C-alpha cells in the first residue's frame, strides 16, 4: 500500500472552440509515490503536470482510471469523506501560498488540525514546533501581509505538515520566489519531509530542484518517462 497510487489515468477536457471535441492531456498513466520517498515531475508548461497533481490529491477526477490514497480509492468516497481524507492524509503546497490574510502565521498553520477536530492546545503546540523548525519563531504572530515571500512559503510548508500527512503534494512551491529564497525553501522542504518520514510528489520547472528528489519523471506526450540524474 502506497500513500499515492494512480492506475491507468486518462484525463480529457472539452475543447474551448465550438465543435472542437475533446483534448486528451493524460493517457493511460501510472504512478506510484512510495512511502518515505520523494518523486518529482518535470515537463513543459501545458503538459498536464498540475492536472496530474490535482488528480493525485483528489482535487480533480480522472476521465478514466483509479486514484488510491493509502489503499482507499477516491472515487468510492463522497465529497465529505474525500475532503476529510485530503485533510488528514495529504498536505498541499502551491506556488500561490493561499494563506488566510486575516490570520497570523500561527493561526494559518493551525487551521488543518482545527478542521480535524483536534484540541486547540495540541494544535498550537504542533504549529509552534513546525514554525520554530523553519526559523519563524519570531514571525508566528504576524499576518501574511507582514511576511516576505520566502516566509509565507515556509508558513505554507508548515501548514501542509500540520496533520502529519503521509504525503505532501507540491505544485511549483518555489516558482514565485527569487533565487536565494527559492534555494532556501527547497532545502527546508526536502529536509523536513525527510526528517518527518513523509512522501513528496513535486511538480516543478526547476530541474536542479527536481533532481534532488529520489525519482524524477518527465511528463511528455500525455505520459510519464523516468529521467536519469543530471550529469
Image (spheres, helix red, strand yellow):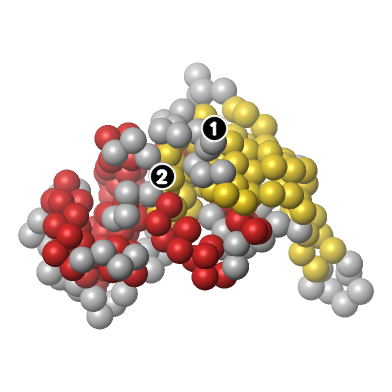
Q: Earlier in the sequence, mark 1 or mark 2?
A: 2
Task: Answer whether residue 22 is visible to the viewer in this image.
Answer: yes
Q: Where does the image place residue 101, in percent across and percent down from the top left?
A: 28, 77
Q: Nearer the viewer, residue 118 or 11?
A: 118
Q: Where does the image place residue 185, in percent across and percent down from the top left?
A: 30, 47
Mark 1: secondary structure: strand
Q: Quadrant of residue 37?
A: top left
Q: Residues within 10 Å of mark 2 (few under 14, many from 20)?
A: many
Q: Where does the image place residue 154, in percent across and percent down from the top left?
A: 27, 54
For the N terminus, the image quarter is: top right
Q: Nearer the viewer, residue 171 or 45?
A: 171
Mark 2: secondary structure: loop
Image: 100 above or below 166: below
Q: Quadrant of residue 144?
A: bottom left
The residue where tag 1 is placed is 216
Residue at position x 58%, y 36% in the image: 32
Callout count: 2
Cα distance between the residues tagged 1 and 2: 19 Å
Amino acid at each position: 500500500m502506497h500513500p499515492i497510487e494512480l492506475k491507468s489515468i486518462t484525463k480529457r477536457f472539452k475543447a474551448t472552440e465550438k465543435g472542437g471535441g475533446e483534448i486528451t492531456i493524460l493517457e493511460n498513466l501510472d504512478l506510484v509515490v512510495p512511502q518515505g520517498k520523494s518523486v518529482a515531475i518535470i515537463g513543459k508548461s501545458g503538459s498536464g503536470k498540475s492536472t496530474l497533481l490535482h488528480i493525485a490529491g483528489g482535487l480533480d477526477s480522472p476521465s478514466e482510471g483509479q486514484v488510491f490514497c493509502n489503499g482507499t480509492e477516491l472515487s468510492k468516497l463522497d465529497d465529505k469523506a474525500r475532503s476529510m481524507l485530503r485533510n488528514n492524509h495529504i498536505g498541499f503546497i502551491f506556488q500561490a501560498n493561499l494563506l488566510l490574510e486575516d490570520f497570523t502565521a500561527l493561526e494559518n498553520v493551525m487551521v488543518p488540525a482545527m478542521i480535524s477536530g483536534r484540541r486547540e492546545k495540541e494544535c498550537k503546540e504542533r504549529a509552534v514546533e513546525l514554525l520554530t523548525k523553519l526559523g519563524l519563531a519570531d514571525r508566528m504572530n504576524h499576518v501574511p501581509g507582514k511576511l516576505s515571500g520566502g516566509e509565507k512559503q515556509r508558513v505554507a510548508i508548515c501548514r501542509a505538515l500540520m496533520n502529519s500527512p503521509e504525503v505532501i503534494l507540491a505544485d511549483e512551491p518555489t516558482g514565485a520566489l527569487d533565487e536565494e529564497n527559492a534555494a532556501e525553501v527547497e532545502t527546508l522542504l526536502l529536509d523536513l519531509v525527510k526528517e518527518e518520514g513523509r512522501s513528496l510528489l513535486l511538480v516543478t520547472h526547476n530541474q536542479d530542484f527536481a533532481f534532488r528528489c529520489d525519482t524524477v519523471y518527465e511528463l511528455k506526450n500525455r505520459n510519464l518517462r523516468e529521467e536519469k540524474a543530471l550529469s
